[in-house]
Image: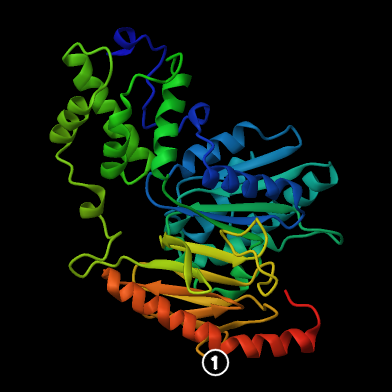
């Protein structure tokens, strides 16, 4: 192995979900904070989604490692179970042998256990990893478990973690989704975070400054990994092996290119459905104010909250935008936007609406800002046309917003 050659104490890019190596990216830190909130909140119910290899299991392991002695944990990772098997597994993780009991007995035993732990000052937490594999019947059991309570408060905190398909499964399960306190989608790392992630892991593995990789290789690694931690690990580990075989003291672009040949990887954009090339979706959102683009982002699978305050995924600092104004939900085939009971609403043209599946070119108005939804490869001149359309719409609604301001006195 290359450890001694590079002066490392342990492999920096193992695929095992070691919490010791958790990189605190913006997304990972926020997702972990949401998970930690389940212990603090009496009705904690959190859903974390992310693509394969995004770091969900590492995040869970880090969270579990830091739980206090007052927390009793059940961690279920085998999820292709019947309702009875699921309840048996949960009880087994809580320390009960219940594999010969019927469903009614399982529910009674679990209810008694949770109430007993509450009376002893304990907090019971259930974590279900790979939750996208849960059947609708098992998800219904999860809903029923989330409702177990004393006369004062609920006695079970729940975290569901899974791939984006989990959100699709939850569509239509209104009674369950109403119980969810927080949701978060764990997106890929940015190019800058990818560089920091690699240096972070190298430093933990024993490299004094994490500088074993030449600076020129980071954009290359990002282009082929797409910012997915598991893919970054695979490529970096293979590149280090290539460098070791050539007796290089640092990992160079040549070593990464040799690794890519060994792995037979194309660029990430060509291997996935992230871009709308030759019929592949590439949804983007452009945020404009006074006809000028202030931000643009690629829409991944999952949910994004739009609002005025800093705890939103997309922050728009404007008195016309509510604290939590609207949500965007993207899946494999479409993106919809939904008003979150905001003061000033969301508009398509002059028509206010509650929920809409977005079409390519839609211009959605939030106060004096506009959101341009783009779901195709758009030439520069097309974007200029959209900017002009947005400015015209903003001008048309400016008088209307002024009237609202006068009528309400205070907006937002």
Residue designated by label 1: 351
Mark 1 crowd level (few <14, some 14–19, many ≥20, 10 Å Cα): few
Is residue 272 visible in this depiction of the protein?
yes
Q: Position of residue 177 (x, y in %)?
A: 59, 69
Q: Is residue 66 above or below residue 1?
A: below
Is residue 99 visible in this depiction of the protein?
no
Q: Quadrant of residue 150?
A: bottom right
Taking the spot 54% from the left edge, 44% from the top edge, the residue there is 26
Q: Is residue 50 left or right of residue 257?
A: right
Taking the spot 43% from the left edge, 74% from the top edge, the residue there is 372
- Which residue is more in the foreground, 88 or 221? 221
Q: Is residue 369 above or below residue 83?
A: below
Q: Position of residue 190 (x, y in %)?
A: 42, 45
So how many labels did they put on this image? 1
Q: Quadrant of residue 253?
A: top left
Q: Is residue 305 left or right of residue 4?
A: right
- Which residue is more in the foreground, 187 or 402? 402
Q: Position of residue 103 (x, y in %)?
A: 59, 60
Taking the spot 38% from the left edge, 44% from the top edge, the residue there is 53
Which part of the image, by quadrant, shows the N terminus?
Answer: top left
Q: Please tell me whether mark 1 sits on a helix, a strand or a loop.
A: strand
Q: Is residue 371 above or below residue 133?
A: below
Q: Position of residue 75 (x, y in %)?
A: 56, 43
Q: Is residue 81 left or right of residue 33?
A: left
Q: Quadrant of residue 145?
A: bottom right
- Which residue is more in the foreground, 190 or 136? 190
């Amino acid at each position: 192995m290359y450890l001694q050659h590079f002066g490392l104490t342990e492999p920096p890019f193992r695929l095992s979900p070691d919490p010791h190596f958790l990189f605190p990216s913006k997304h990972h830190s926020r997702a972990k904070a949401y998970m930690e909130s389940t212990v603090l909140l009496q009705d904690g119910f959190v859903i974390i989604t992310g693509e394969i290899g995004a770091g969900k299991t590492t995040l869970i392991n880090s969270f579990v490692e830091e739980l206090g002695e007052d927390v009793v944990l059940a961690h279920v990772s085998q999820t292709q179970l019947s309702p009875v098997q699921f309840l048996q597994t949960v009880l087994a993780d809580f320390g009960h042998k219940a594999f010969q009991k019927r469903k009614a007995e399982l529910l009674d035993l679990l209810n008694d256990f949770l109430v007993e732990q509450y009376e002893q000052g304990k907090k019971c937490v259930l974590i279900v990893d790979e939750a996208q594999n849960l059947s609708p019947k098992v998800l219904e059991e999860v809903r029923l478990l989330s409702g177990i309570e004393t006369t004062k408060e609920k006695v079970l905190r729940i975290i569901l973690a899974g791939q984006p398909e989990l959100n699709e499964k939850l569509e239509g399960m209104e009674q369950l989704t109403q119980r969810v306190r927080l949701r978060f989608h764990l997106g890929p790392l940015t190019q800058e975070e990818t560089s920091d992630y690699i240096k972070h892991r190298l430093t933990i593995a024993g490299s004094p400054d994490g500088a074993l990789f030449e600076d020129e290789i980071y954009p290359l690694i990002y282009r082929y990994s797409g910012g997915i931690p598991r893919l970054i690990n695979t490529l970096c580990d293979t590149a280090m092996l290539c460098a070791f075989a050539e007796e290089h003291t640092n990992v160079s672009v040549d070593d990464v290119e040799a690794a890519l040949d060994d792995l037979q990887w194309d660029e990430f954009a060509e291997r996935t459905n992230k871009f709308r090339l030759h019929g592949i979706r590439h949804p983007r959102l452009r945020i404009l104010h006074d006809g000028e683009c202030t931000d643009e982002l690629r829409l991944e699978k999952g949910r994004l909250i739009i609002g005025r305050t800093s705890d939103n995924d997309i922050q728009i600092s404007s008195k016309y935008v509510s604290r939590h104004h609207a949500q965007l939900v993207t899946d494999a085939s479409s993106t919809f936007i939904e008003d979150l009971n905001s003061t000033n609403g969301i508009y398509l043209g002059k028509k206010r609406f509650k929920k809409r599946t977005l079409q390519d070119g839609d211009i959605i108005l939030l106060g004096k800002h506009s959101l341009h939804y783009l779901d195709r490869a758009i030439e520069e001149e097309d974007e200029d046309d959209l900017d002009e359309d947005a400015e015209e719409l903003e001008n048309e609604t400016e008088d209307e917003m002024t009237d609202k301001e006068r009528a309400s006195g205070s907006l937002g």
